[in-house]
Image: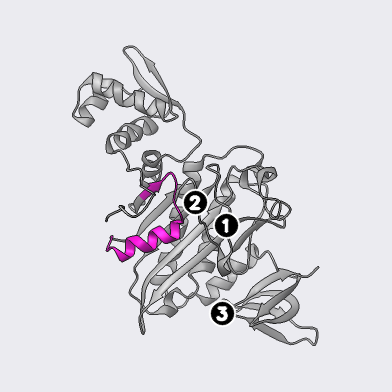
Amino acid sequence: MSYENLQFAPREVDEDSVVILKALLEAGDRYVSGSLLAEQLGVSRPAVHGKLDKLREEGFEVDAVRNRGYRIKTLPEVLHPALLRCTLEGRGSKIGLRYFPVLDSTNSEAERRIASGESSPFAIVSSCQTNGRGRLGRVWQSNSADNLYLSVGFEPNIPPQQLQHFTLWAGICICRQLQGFVPKAPLKIKWPNDLHCMGRKFAGMLTEAKLDADRIRSIIFGLGLNVNGNPNDFPDEVRPLATSLHAIHGETLPLNDVAAVVICAIEEAYQTCIQETDTTDKLSDAWEPLDALAGQQVTAIQQGVEITGIASGIDEGGALLLLMPDGSQKAIRAGDVTLKK
């Protein structure tokens, strides 16, 4: 694919760095000999030393002891493509990976790559977006490398109904996996595509699909996730409403680990949808403990009309159920939903 007309260029994964990092990470606190690394890479010992110096420049603290070898003491706090690849493969994922230091939009880049014929599935990850977008055309603030901006592209070629619950399942799988990083604070999903904790948003999901007459040709799942960002640095208009995993947990989280966990969760959600012909009961059961709106009075705007009721979970089709004042139940299949003040 040509990038001549684009100002954004990917930073390719350095395969030698992947080999070195795998060996050092698998060793843990044990030292790995330079001779072993040289043998695995097919290079000289001085060449290994040079490659380790490069990793040090990129934020890795590597300890070297004569006659013992090397070990990693600390990892970089920012995204690093080789480290992310190692972490993904350590979790059993073979997904294609493209990392961009700066990008207009990860969803837009995924669209371009699918249009150019790149094999899927693949993940697009960036440290900064200049034109990040959210649902309903909203802007997603994406200028902090402390946070995570990614998209995963698939080409399923299956009937649309098999992926009608994909966004909901993705939210479920992502919340479940991220909960391990913040065990003391419950992560929830605000229907249909926001992730919340204690009433504040820490992530937004955006799913975009291209359909033929009876098949989904491609589907792109995008996520903006506030990981280590400081909410005090957020724009004035979102500061009272937003939070980050760092603010929730009180400590800096390993960004590459978080990215790998999220990508694997998205893959899990996709497989859940395409492998099961009837997941409706499972979906509602999985949704219930993560429902951020349950029991609260909300207002849904559907085709310009305001509808107010008590949120009562989701139905078998993934629609939000509202208990109306007259005791009836109304299903909201699309629209914008806010808590009633």
Q: Nearer the viewer, residue 131 or 241?
A: 131
Relative to residue 315, is residue 76 depicted above or below? Answer: above
Image quarter hosting the N terminus: bottom left
Mark 3, Cα crowd under 10 Å, few <14 / some 14-19 / many 20+, is some
Amino acid at dot 3 = Glu
Amino acid at dot 2 = Gln
Determine if the magenta segment contains residue 116. Answer: yes
**How far apart in space, not on screen, are marks 1 and 2 (Cα)?**
9 Å
Image quarter hosting the C terminus: bottom right
Q: Is residue 38 left or right of residue 125?
A: left
Colouring mode (rainbow / by chain / secondary structure / one colour):
one colour
Q: Is residue 60 left or right of residue 292?
A: left
CB-based contact (under 8 Å), mark 1 and mark 2? yes
**On the image, numbered disc 3 is attached to which residue?**
316
Span highlighted in magenta in the image: 98-118
Q: Residue at x 23, y 20 (%)?
A: 45
**How far apart in space, not on screen, are marks 2 and 3 (Cα)?**
36 Å
Quarter of the image where one finds residue 24: top left
Q: Is residue 3 left or right of residue 304?
A: left
Image mark for residue 129: 2
* In this rendering, the label closer to the viewer, 2 or 3: 2
Image mark for residue 140: 1
SS under mark 3: loop
Mark 2, Cα crowd under 10 Å, few <14 / some 14-19 / many 20+, is many
Determine if the magenta segment contains residue 133. Answer: no
Q: Position of residue 278 (x, y in %)?
A: 46, 78
Q: Position of residue 151 (x, y in %)?
A: 44, 57
* In this rendering, the label closer to the viewer, 3 or 1: 1
**Tally of marks:** 3
Quarter of the image where one finds residue 339: bottom right
Q: In the current view of this chain or complex, which residue is farthest to the front? A: 5
Q: Nearer the viewer, residue 63 or 219?
A: 219
